[in-house]
Image: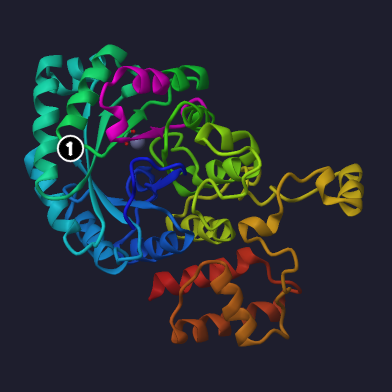
């Protein structure tokens, strides 16, 4: 699906398979990445950063296979990360080859601390490299994204110069990363406003934001960025990613959805417009969260917003009483809107294979018939010993099958 620069909706760029996978212990193999990629497509992400093709043979293969299978005419834009060097860009282009809609995302740091200690480059060198490498990426694909890494700690005047050159060289999206999660919402919003006001050709590109959660502020920063002109949000499922993680997709999407009357005017819409701000199918959120947690082994904290086990649980008597009288007393969104079925069929020893397979599918597992048969035998075995089988039991049975397959 082609993305237009003048978008009056928010583009969701998912980087679970690139930045998300870049966290200790979350490594996925190619088959697991394909399972996640298919689910991300069902979720409705606009852009999927499938990996960093130059980083390893496995990453190359994952980007290539995702491009082949998920990068269809109606599918999302498939993207690969590439440093601003020719070999990375060429490799990204080769890996993306089969995708109908493809993007190369190239980056180079702009903060003085990165220039001095990591890159050992001058500002002038950055000003020379950026347009050359953006133009090089453009020689392979129409859709080029450029990120000035550590933009959150870069000199804004220098940042404006770099962005102007990147856009003039053909970047269709300029992404502003708060690489170390240092900025606060007011600062980040002001940075985006400054870019909008001071980069002369900014209207030719989409402004994107990318942020880490070192101070727990990534989502708040992004929402402030939207108010100031950002139209693409880079995020991961369950907020997984380097160190404290990335901005969480489910929190951003539901924040924009639940508070749409507040955000609509910032996108030039009437406050009461019911047109969704993103094209995410929110009913797929819970399933996607469980799938990513299961495959990466990254547990979701119980009190995590939107997808934590307690997010829709009410413990205290006063709250339970209120909820029974009217859900709106203590719930700002419906559990069903993220695909959590309130009327879950409770599985036990009398449940049949069909209900079992259906529930696994709801939990995001795609098992072959023979794996379902094997898992079903284990389920019956457990159901003989335990009165009620929880989703956690089912996930552990299904995970076993996936890892033995
Ligand atoms: O955090 C970061 O700066 C990144 C860039 C490569 C966009 O992940
Ligand atoms: Zn990042």
Query: Is 332 displayed left or right of 215 in the figure?
Result: right
Magenta residue check for 196: yes
Q: Which residue is drawn at 51% across and 27% down?
A: 224
Tell me where residue 30 sits by quadrant: bottom left
Measuring from the top left, give residue 235's x and y in whole percent.
43, 42
Q: How is the image coloured?
A: rainbow
Query: Is 351 displayed left or right of 16 in the figure?
Result: right
Measuring from the top left, give residue 259's x and y in whole percent.
64, 39
Answer with the quadrant where ligand 1 appears in the image. Answer: top left
Tell me where residue 127 sits by quadrant: top left
Query: Is 144 displayed left or right of 314 in the figure?
Result: left
Q: Residue at x 27, y 12 (%)?
A: 157
Vertical side of 273 occupied by 183: above or below: above
Using the rendered image of the protein, determine whether residue 122 is visible from the camera's viewpoint: no
Query: Is 204 displayed left or right of 361 in the figure?
Result: left
Query: Circle 1 — which element?
Result: loop
Q: On the rendered image, what quadrant is the N terminus found in?
A: bottom left
Magenta residue check for 229: no
Using the rendered image of the protein, determine whether residue 14 is visible from the camera's viewpoint: yes
Measuring from the top left, give residue 252's x and y in whole percent.
53, 41
Identify the magenta region.
191-216
Which residue position holds label 1? 170
Tell me the crowding category of disc 1: few under 14, some 14 to 19, or many 20 or more residues within 10 angstroms, Cα based. many
Vertical side of 248 occupied by 109: above or below: above
Q: Which residue is drawn at 49% across and 70% down?
A: 365
Pick the residue in front: 265 or 335: 265
Measuring from the top left, give residue 386's x and y in whole percent.
72, 74
Q: On the rendered image, what quadrant is the C terminus found in?
A: bottom left
């Amino acid at each position: 699906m082609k993305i237009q620069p003048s978008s009056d909706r928010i583009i969701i760029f998912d980087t679970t398979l690139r930045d998300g996978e870049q966290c200790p212990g979350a490594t996925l193999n190619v088959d697991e990445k394909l399972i996640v990629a298919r689910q991300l497509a069902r979720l409705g992400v606009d852009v999927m950063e499938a990996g960093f093709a130059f980083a390893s043979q496995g990453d190359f293969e994952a980007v290539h296979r995702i491009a082949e299978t998920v990068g269809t005419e109606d599918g999302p834009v498939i993207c690969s990360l590439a440093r601003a060097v020719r070999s990375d860009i060429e490799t990204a282009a080769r890996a993306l080859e089969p995708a109908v809609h493809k993007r190369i995302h190239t980056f180079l740091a702009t903060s003085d601390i990165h220039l001095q200690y990591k890159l050992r480059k001058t500002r002038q060198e950055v000003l020379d490299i950026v347009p050359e490498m953006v133009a090089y990426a453009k020689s392979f694909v129409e859709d080029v994204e450029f990120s000035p890494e550590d933009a959150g700690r870069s000199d804004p005047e220098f940042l404006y110069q770099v962005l102007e050159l990147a856009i003039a060289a053909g970047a269709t999206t300029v992404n502003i990363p708060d690489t170390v999660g240092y900025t606060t919402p007011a600062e980040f919003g002001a940075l985006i406003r400054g870019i909008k006001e001071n980069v002369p050709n900014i209207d030719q590109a989409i402004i994107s934001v990318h942020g880490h959660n070192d101070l727990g502020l990534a989502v708040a920063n992004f929402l402030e960025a939207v108010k100031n002109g950002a139209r693409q949000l880079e995020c991961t499922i369950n907020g997984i990613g380097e160190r404290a993680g990335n901005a969480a997709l489910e929190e951003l999407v539901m924040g924009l959805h639940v508070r749409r009357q507040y955000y609509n005017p910032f996108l030039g819409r009437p406050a009461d417009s019911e047109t969704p701000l993103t094209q995410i199918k929110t009913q797929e959120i819970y399933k996607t969260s469980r799938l990513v947690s299961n495959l990466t082994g990254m547990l979701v904290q119980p009190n995590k917003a939107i997808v934590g086990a307690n997010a829709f649980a009410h413990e205290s008597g006063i709250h339970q009483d209120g909820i029974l009288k009217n859900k709106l007393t203590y719930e700002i969104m419906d559990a069903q809107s993220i695909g959590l079925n309130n009327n879950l069929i409770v599985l036990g020893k009398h449940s049949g294979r069909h209900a079992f397979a259906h529930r696994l599918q709801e939990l995001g597992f795609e098992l072959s018939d023979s794996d379902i048969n094997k898992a079903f035998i284990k389920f019956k075995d457990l159901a003989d010993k335990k009165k009620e089988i929880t989703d956690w039991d089912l996930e552990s049975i299904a995970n076993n099958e996936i890892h033995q397959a």
